Amino acid sequence: MDGERIRNKEDNSPYQIAVRRDWIQSPGETSLNLPHRLLIEIVTENPEESDIDVMAQ
């Protein structure tokens, strides 16, 4: 973590996909590392403050 942003700095997976995702900081952004079963997701306590118009699951 660095202030209000977070990233997966390093791991031992062969493709380094989560590491290459770099920093995330806005609500709705995610970083997924499947080999380590790690999901980092930025959420907000106040949905009105989000810049997201629509989110599909």
Image (cartoon, rainbow, N blue to C red):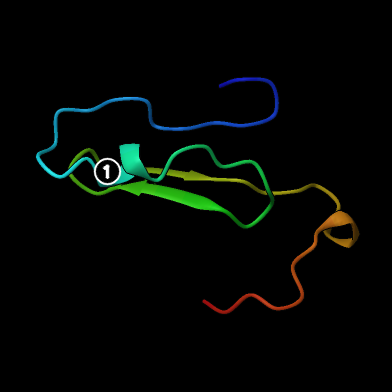
In the image: residue 24, left or right of residue 36: right
Query: At 52% from the left edge and 37% from the top edge, which residue is drawn?
Result: 23
Query: At 80% from the left edge and 62% from the top edge, which residue is drawn?
Result: 51
In the image: residue 40, left or right of residue 13: right
Instruction: Check the image and name the residue furthest to the top.
Output: 2
In the image: residue 31, left or right of residue 52: left
Quadrant placement of the N terminus: top right
Local secondary structure at mark 1: loop
Q: Is residue 56 above or below residue 20?
A: below
| Amino acid tagged 1 | Arg
Q: Is residue 56 above or below residue 40?
A: below
Q: Residues within 10 Å of mark 1 (few under 14, many from 20)?
A: few
Q: Nearest the camera: 45 or 13?
A: 13
Query: At 62% from the left edge and 46% from the top edge, which residue is drawn?
Result: 42
Q: Is residue 8 above or below residue 27?
A: above
* Numbered circles on residues, count: 1
- Residue 34, percent across and down? 24, 49
Query: At 14% from the left edge and 28% from the top edge, which residue is drawn?
Result: 12
Q: Is residue 8 above or below residue 18?
A: above
- Residue 14, percent across and down? 9, 39
Q: Nearest the camera: 48 or 20?
A: 20
- Identify residue for label 1: 37
- Residue 36, percent across and down? 22, 38
